[in-house]
Amino acid sequence: MPAAEGYFTVHRAALAWAAVLAGGLIAAVSLYLDGRSALPVDAVAVVGTQPILRSQWLRAVQAVETDRGAPLDTAARKAILQRLIDEELLFQHVIDSGLARNDPGLRKTLIAGLIDATTAGETADEDAARALFARDPVYFSAQVRLRVSALTVPAGATPPEPAELQSALQGGAALAPLSPIDLPAQPLTLPQIAQRLGGSAAELLRTAERGRVLGPLRSGDVLLYLMLHERLADAPRYQDVADAVRSELARRQAETALAELLSTLRSTTPIRIADAL
């Protein structure tokens, strides 16, 4: 090969490699600039496809500054942004890994958060709260008091006839093997009933109908029979229980909002159920 031809061959090869390297450099710079230009104007970072908004970051910075009582320097502000990025990475991992779907505890936490979010930020409607209280003031009474009667039967004894139980609990007179329990004449609160007759008896009496024979409940070596005669509740003033009324109103509104959301999701989401379950 002539010397001149060899020179030009080597020279052309060098130019070709230079072009390849230059092209790669241009492509890398282009990708870098594209990545920067792709950042939304209202974001301080993008994790995958999810932006971290500047307002979200500034709220986190302000919260830490308020807690410390002093402004943060640049390094601390960057550290907060990094924490938000890490949280987003972890959240995306939870979603991608299926934990949110398959872990019962995590599912309940997310659903509870969704329920709370249905009425988050809403101001309680004072008129609606007062209307709720007016419909059922006794519901918000601090203490319900019950007048009850109780008697026992030895566990091994022949069970008494229902009519005999009814008569003994209503009239207070009982024949063996029935034994009346001596209770105060005045109505008792549920904690007082639980103290004297046990927690199961108090829970049963809490929602009982008047005049019905309740039981038997096992209490040690005897069977316990009960009857509710009167339920008393002091009707409170609205101003004394206003916070409780507003909380109850918010709970009911959240339940209604959740029911509406579920109704919408059921109507717009395809659902197929196996024939055999």
Image: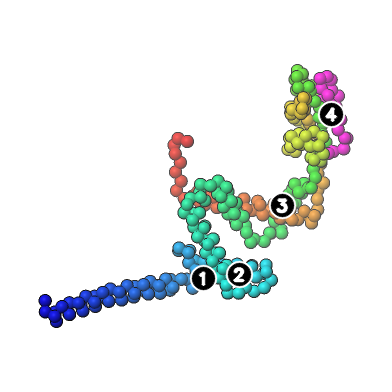
Local secondary structure at mark 2: helix
Residue wearing tag 4 = 181
Query: Does residue 250 appear in the picture of this structure?
Result: yes
Q: Which region of the structure is painted magenta?
A: 168-188
* Residue lying farthest to the left in this orientation: 1
Name the spot of residue 264 as percent of width and height, x first: 52, 52
Q: CA distance from mark 3 to mark 1?
A: 46 Å
Position of residue 197 relative to residue 1, above or below, is above
At label 2, counting other C-alpha atoms closer than 10 Å, the crowd grade (few under 14, some 14-19, many 20 or more) is many
Q: CA distance from mark 3 to mark 4?
A: 39 Å
* Amino acid of disc 3: Leu
Earlier residue among tags 1 and 2? 1
Name the spot of residue 133 as percent of width and height, x first: 74, 52
Residue wearing tag 1 = 44
Name the spot of residue 23 as percent of width and height, x first: 30, 74
Residues marked 2 and 4 touching at CB (< 8 Å): no
Residue wearing tag 2 = 61
Give the label, 2 or 4, closer to the camera: 2
Q: Residue at x 55, y 49 (%)?
A: 107
Q: Would residue 254 appear left or right of 219 to someone viewing this image? A: left
Q: CA distance from mark 1 to mark 4?
A: 73 Å
